[in-house]
Amino acid sequence: MILFPAIDLKDGQAVRLLRGDMNQATVFNPDPVAQALTFMRAGFEWLHLVDLNGAFAGKPVNEAAVKKILTVTDLPIQLGGGLRDLDTIEHWLALGVTRVILGTAAVKDPELVRAACRKFPGRVVVGIDARSGRVAVEGWAEESDITAGELALRFADAGVVAIVHTDIDRDGALGGVNVEATRDLAATVPLPIIASGGVSSLDDIAGLMAADPEPNDLRPTERRGGIAGAVIGRALYDGRIHPASALALVRGVEDD
């Protein structure tokens, strides 16, 4: 399993929202570049970046911060928030972003997702953010009538490299990850699932690993589905999850 430390960008700062509410943002680091370096030095293998302002605006807003992070770190980065057209997607991939996350576009412009998968194979992730099982879009401000499972199945054959599934009701609340919903989604669609929202302890990570229908020792490139990763945010910032312990758990080694 891959652990993705999250850097959510709002007004150029690294923040965490409570259940997706932009009015309930806690600034954890005014310097997101320094935060990215902290995660890199802790031993994480990926970074998960979200342009929160961009998600609402429908276009990149925190571009300067993302560019600086790309410059100072050598970690692969997956980026979401405000990616609504091929030119913007190509722009970020050309700058060095490893994978883009398409959320609102998956609901409102599914052909864009398919076109991006064709043009940039292996570099497109679909973000499925659900509240009470229903997918939310436009920075979680609008709810749709489609379920997470229904949306995921629409892209099962599109060339999507993974699904990031966020339980909005748990995001930033430190109430525990929704293992059941993650497991159900992994059983529904033959794509690697990355769990997001509510990861607050090593037990949450262990629970996801135990629920994974595929062997935990598979390399990411060997996976055809299952629970492939977890995004961790607030629990890393406030010290509830220690990076070394979490990484040791997913790697199957003793924590020093």
Image: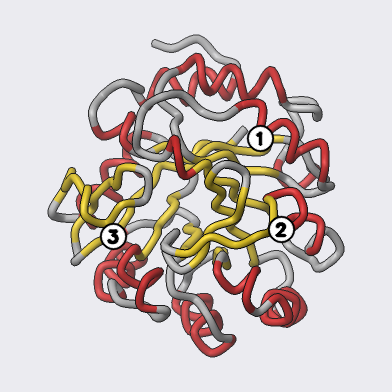
**Residue at the spot 59% in from the left edge and 46% down from the top edge:** 165
97 left or right, relative to 244: right
3D distance between C-alphas at marks 2 and 1: 17 Å
Task: Give the image quarter of residue 82.
Answer: bottom left
Q: Which residue is mark 3?
A: 9
The quadrant of the rendering that contains the N terminus is: top right
| Mark 3 vs mark 2: in front | 3
Secondary structure under tag 3 reads strand
Q: Which residue is mark 2?
A: 161
Q: Quadrant of the C terminus?
A: top left
Q: Secondary structure under badge 1? A: helix
Question: What secondary structure is marked by label 2?
Answer: loop
Front position in the image: 128 or 63: 128
Which one is closest to the eye, mark 2 or mark 1? 1
Distance in Å between CA atoms under marks 3 and 2: 24 Å
- Earlier sequence position, callout 3 versus callout 2: 3
